Amino acid sequence: MSLKYLYHNEAFPLESGESLEGIKIAYQTWGNLDKSTKKVIWVCHALTGSADVFDWWSDLFGADKLFNPSDYFIVCANVLGSHYGSTGPLSKKSNGNKFYHSFPAITTLDMVRAHEVLRKYLGIEQIHLLIGASLGGQQAIQWAVEKPEIAEQLALIATNAQHSPYGIAFNETQRMAIQADQSFKYSYDYAGLEGLKAARAIAMLSYRSASGYLVTQSEDSNEKADAFKASSYQRYQGEKFVKRFNAFSYWTLSKAMDSHNVFRNHPDALKRIQARTLCIGITTDLLFPVSEQKFLNEEIEDSIYVEIESEFGHDGFLVEGKQLEEILKDFLNEKTAKYKPTIFKQKHLIVA
């Protein structure tokens, strides 16, 4: 399906007190919205994701997959500040100049308010399942807090209610790498790319785990003293990333993740959630440790907690497709109520 755009030409107020003159929302939909038969699945994407959920979450979305457009109406919208079509730092202001460094601070609440604009435009009254992982999960939580009546069910994967000091420190370290690139002081589309390469390599350390690197980057030879496989992997990740993303958006979205705190406007935030909720943790996740998903489970009234075993850390939400499929299928079929809390091991749900 091709990318679609919604042009919202009214002033869009931001949580910071600033506002955008108008916003463009890039989004994709799959299936036909038939209120009598179709259930809506709304996907919130992660930090550097796009609206094309069929591309980056192909284990779950597609023909003959768990979320099949013949069975559901599926929506995924690109977040404000991103590189992939919605209003962001490389967008033009009314004077014809691009924002670059002048792009205002964005929060997950701002992202959710943009989703609300799109939801109303599409005529969606109820979301059957609101799902997201990482920054996507942060958006989903924020939305369920702000508009408790919108989602019937909520799937929160490797995410949290408030970003941790450790997560903020990781993001700040990446921004320091971008700042160390002297070109980032200037305003042009490709500024800061050398710094962004280093930032992405740093990020990989938080997305994966030590055991995961042992699985994928170990050497067979005992003779090496340099040019290690793990070194080339880090460089490759940086080189690959700058071909698809820009430093200004990365800066903006990492700051948005840092600011995430559903309690800022609602001290009783998680008690406001009405949706039946699934909280999924990943055993080796350093960036969003399982304690954060367990906390969500403890605080959200109608919720269950399931844990995935994976060697691949936070990236497990992208890598462990079969495990996620089984968990989500059981959740949608209301077969996981007896497991509280649970650990998901290979193909069996086991009481923790």
Image (cartoon, rainbow, N blue to C red):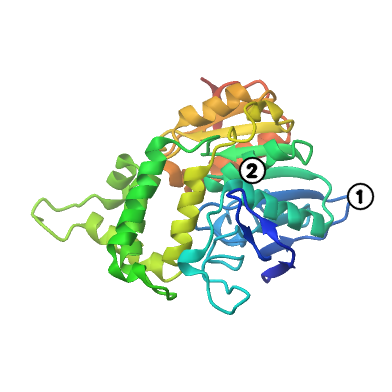
Looking at the image, residue 86 sits to the left or right of residue 199; the answer is right
- Identify the residue at horizontal 61%, vertical 48% (top origin): 15
Q: Which of the 4 quarters of the picture holds residue 227?
A: bottom left
Is residue 234 visible in the rendered image? The answer is yes
- Identify the residue at horizontal 52%, vertical 66% (top origin): 89
Foreground: disc 1 or disc 2: 2
- Identify the residue at horizontal 63%, vertical 39% (top origin): 141
Local crowd size for mark 1, using a 10 Å CA cut-off: few (<14), some (14–19), many (≥20) = few
* Relative image position of residue 211 (x, y in whole percent): 31, 40
| Residue nearer the viewer, 186 or 191 | 186
What is the C-alpha distance between the residues marked 1 and 2? 25 Å
Q: Secondary structure at mark 1?
A: loop
- Check residue 339 in the rendering and tell me which mark sits there, or answer none: none
* Relative image position of residue 26 (x, y in whole percent): 66, 65
Identify residue type, mark 1.
Ser
In the image, farthest residue toward the bottom: 96
In this figure, which residue is indicated by the disc labeled 2? 140
* Relative image position of residue 216 (x, y in whole percent): 31, 50
Relative to 186, residue 228 above or below: above
Identify residue type, mark 2.
Ala
In this figure, which residue is indicated by the disc labeled 1? 36
Looking at the image, residue 318 sits to the left or right of residue 285; the answer is right
| Residue nearer the viewer, 189 or 290 | 189
| Residue nearer the viewer, 298 or 321 | 298
Q: Looking at the figure, which quarter contains the N terminus?
A: bottom right
Q: Are marks 1 and 2 in contact (CB under 8 Å)?
A: no
Pick whichever of labels 1 and 2 is earlier in the sequence.
1
